[in-house]
Image (cartoon, helix red, strand yellow):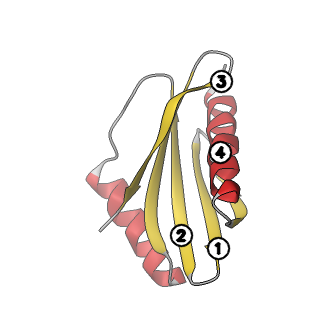
Amino acid sequence: MNLDEIGGYGQHHVVTALVGQGFQCRRSTKPRGANDIKARKSKQNRLVQVRTFLKPSDISAAEKEKLMARAEKLGYEAWVAEVEVDETGVQVGRIIWTRMT
C-alpha cells in the first residue's frame, strides 16, 4: 500500500466520523498521505488535518503552525485527526482528535 492509499483510507474514516457528528465535509487532498478536511455545522467550522499511519507519529511544530495559520485565515478551528490503519486500510483503534491551540 502506498502513501496515497494510506491517506485515502484515513480520510475516509475521518469523514465518516465527522458526518456522524453532523458535519458537512469537503476534502482537500494533497499528495503523499497528507489530507485536510473542511468540516462545517451550524456554528462550528473545523479545518482537520488527517494524519494516517501504519505506526504512530507526531505532528511537527512547523506542520502545527501551518495548519493553525491556514485555519485562522479561513475562520476555522484547527484540528488534527490521527488515524491508524492496518495493511488493508481497516481502522485500528479510535481516531485521536486534537484541537490545535
Residue pictured at 40% horizontal, 74% vertical: 69
Name the residue that disc number 3 marks.
90
Tell which circle, 2 or 4, labels the residue nearer the N-terminal end: 4
Tell which circle, 4 or 3, labels the residue nearer the N-terminal end: 4
Dot 4 and dot 3 residues touching (CB under 8 Å): no
* Tag 2 secondary structure: strand
Residue pictured at 45% horizontal, 73% vertical: 77
Residue pictured at 67% horizontal, 66% vertical: 23
Q: Rate crowding at label 4 as few (under 14), some (14 to 19) or many (20 or more) other CA atoms within 10 Å.
A: many
Name the residue that disc number 2 marks.
46
Q: Give me the C-alpha separation between circle 3 and circle 2.
A: 25 Å
* Tag 4 secondary structure: helix
Residue 96 appears at what percent x and percent y? Answer: 43, 43
Instruction: Look at the image and tell me in which quarter the N terminus lies.
Output: top right
Tell which circle, 3 or 2, labels the residue nearer the N-terminal end: 2
Instruction: Look at the image and tell me in which quarter the C terminus lies.
Output: bottom left
Q: Is residue 62 above or below residue 84?
A: below
Q: Quadrant of residue 33?
A: top right
* Tag 1 secondary structure: strand
Name the residue that disc number 1 marks.
40
Q: Is residue 91 above or below residue 29?
A: above
Dot 2 and dot 1 residues touching (CB under 8 Å): yes
Name the residue that disc number 4 marks.
11
Query: Identity of the amino acid at label 2?
Result: Arg
Q: Give me the C-alpha separation between circle 4 and circle 3.
A: 12 Å
